[in-house]
Every structure is written in C-alpha cells, then in structure tokens.
Amino acid sequence: MARPATRLWFERGLLISALAVMIVVYFYVTNSNLRELVTPHDCFFSQATGLLCPACGGTRAMIYLLKGQILLAIRSNFLAVTTLPLILYGFYFAFRLAFEKRFTSADIYISPFWIWSYFVFVLLFWFVRNIPALVFLRPY
Amino acid sequence: MDDTRPVAMQAPNNTLGTVALVCGILGVLLFFCCPYLSVVLGLVALVCGILANQQNQRYALAGIILGIAALALGIIFAIIGQLFFTEFIHMIQQEMIY
C-alpha cells in the first residue's frame, strides 16, 4: 500500500530531527566532564529493594561509549552496550521506511526467536547482576 | 495428471506485533527504576502496535495497551521522581547546614 507523500515527508522530518538531536547530544557529551553529566543514583527500585535494575549504569555506559571508552562502557552496563546494535538496526528499518517508497512496515521481518531471546536476556541480566558473587556486573 | 500440488504455507509476519509486546512488557517492568526509558519503550510499543494492528498482526492490541500503560506510568513516575529527588536533595542540604 503506497503511503501519501505528506506522511513520507513527516517520517523523514522526524528521522532527521532525531539524528540532529543525537549529534547535539554527542557533541555535548564529548565536550563535558563525566561528573557533571551523571546525576546521583536516583533509581526507585534500587532505593526500595537495594537491588540493581537492568538499566543501572546505563547512562554511564552510553557516555563512556560516546567518549570511545568501550571497555569502561561494558563494565558499566553490558546490557546497554549490547542493545545499541539493536537500536541501530531499528534505525536502519526506520530509514528504509522513510526513504524507500516501496518498503512498507509489512516488509520488516526479524525472527520471533531473536526478539524473545533478547527479552529473556534482559530478565537474565537483571537476575544475574544481583548475584553477590558476580561483582563485575555491577556498574563501574 | 493431478494438478493440485500442496502449496507451502508462509508463516505470518508478526515482527512488529512481537516487538510492540516485548517493548510494552519491558516498559511496564522498568517504570519503577527508570521512568524515562519506560516512556521511550512505551512510545516504541505504541507506534509498533499501531502499525501491527493495521496489518492484523498478533499481539498488536496487547502491545498498544502495554505501550499506553508504560507511557502513562513512565510520565507519572518521572514527575514523582523529579519532585521527590528535589525534596531529597533539599533535605540533605538542610542537614548539612544545621
């Protein structure tokens, strides 16, 4: 089903805006001090239970990644680093949707096995990083 | 000769519906610890769910409902978090003064 031109241009505008925001964030992060960017630990779950959530250390991981320190990013939050290729894959589909007229949302295909595997991986990571013996999975 | 050969059934494409459902579940699970992430996941679930619903994919409605729930909970907890932590920081500052 062909999409109207106005919708296509709306999608393109949305994507280009998202890219512009990402570029601004990149330059802001790379020109800032890490201590200024990372706020004190404000996780409700962590404060209520004393356990870590799967996203704890995610902001630090992204900042380290943007600064090119991959090992520190992995140490901060392994899940955030492994999720990044999936986000990029999502952007690839979004770009194809916005710029290829013949490509529709019905053409997007990812095996359900991989989608559910990722879901299980998130839950497993949440469980495993709270095991006291596995200290290296705690945010760096 | 019999011309009725069996036709291979193509598995239905439920990618967007499944993505919507998974993002919705994760959004609802994570609203308590990271409400901003929950808002993003809720938005992704909502958009994918709407697109999947247009193609009658499985899990589309569940994705839409969970997406709306994640979005609402994320926004509420983000606001509560801002208020609560402003109070908390203010309290610590007062403790330091006295």
Image (spheres, helix red, strand yellow):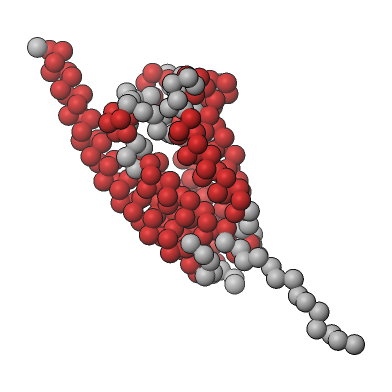
Relative to residue A120, is residue A44 depicted above or below? above
User: Which residue is found at the position 38% from the left and 55% from the top?
Assistant: B66
Q: Quadrant of the C terminus of chain B?
A: top left
Q: Residue furthest right?
A: B1
Measuring from the top left, give residue A79's x and y in whole percent: 52, 33
Measuring from the top left, give residue A17's x and y in whole percent: 48, 47
Q: Residue furthest left?
A: B98
Residue B95 in view: yes
Relative to residue B58, is residue A77 depicted above or below? above
User: Which residue is found at the position 38% from the left and 59% from the top?
Assistant: B65
Q: Which of these two is toward me, A125 or B55?
A: A125
Q: Which of these two is toward me, A14 or B80?
A: B80
Measuring from the top left, give residue B32's x and y in whole percent: 32, 40
- Total number of numbered discs in the rendering: 0
Question: Toward which corner of the image does residue B81 lie, by quadrant?
Answer: top left
Relative to residue A75, is residue A117 depicted above or below? below
Relative to residue A101, is residue B21 depicted above or below? above
Residue A10 in view: no
Drawn side of residue A91 relative to residue A18, left or right:
right
User: Which residue is found at the position 45% from the left and 34% from the top?
Assistant: A126
Q: Which of these two is toward me, A108 or A45?
A: A45
Question: Toward which corner of the image does residue A118 lie, by quadrant?
Answer: top right
User: Which residue is found at the position 63% from the left and 57% from the top?
Assistant: A109
Measuring from the top left, give residue A84's x and y in whole percent: 55, 37
Q: Quadrant of the N terminus of chain B?
A: bottom right
